[in-house]
Amino acid sequence: MNYEIKFTKAARKMFRKLSQELQERIQIKIDNLAIEPRPNGVKKLQGKENSYRIRVGDYRIIYDIFDNVLLISIVEIGHRSQVYKDNT
């Protein structure tokens, strides 16, 4: 069963600021999360119950998984040098 993907307003805004090429690469990864929410290379974020991150080059996608309702919430998308600053 596929998961539904939703973006927070902040994540959608971050996504739109990226180059078209990067948006396409990230969108492929996000689409794949609907099928496999915990793909190879995923890292569970410490201190967060349902938060994970995947890498797309130097960029990170931070997301929460809600298995009980088959939902993935994209929380943050950004360069690795910036994405963890508010999450630590």
Image: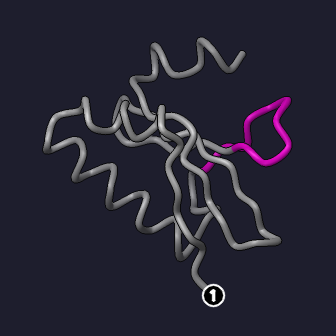
Q: How many marks?
A: 1
Q: Magenta includes 44?
A: yes
**Above or below, 67 relative to 43:** below
Main SS category, magenta section: loop
> What x and y, as percent, mark residue 43?
66, 43
Q: Nearer the viewer, residue 43 or 34?
A: 34
- For the point 26% across and 51% down, the residue is 25
Q: Magenta includes 83?
A: no
> What x and y, as percent, mark residue 47?
85, 29
Q: Nearer the viewer, residue 7 or 46?
A: 7
In the picture, residue 62 is in which quadrant? Answer: top right
Q: Which residues are magenta?
A: 42-51
Q: Nearer the viewer, residue 62 or 13?
A: 13
**Quadrant holding the C terminus:** top right
* Amino acid at pointer 1: Met
- For the point 82% across and 36% down, the residue is 48
**Quadrant holding the N terminus:** bottom right
Q: Is residue 8 left or right of residue 15?
A: right
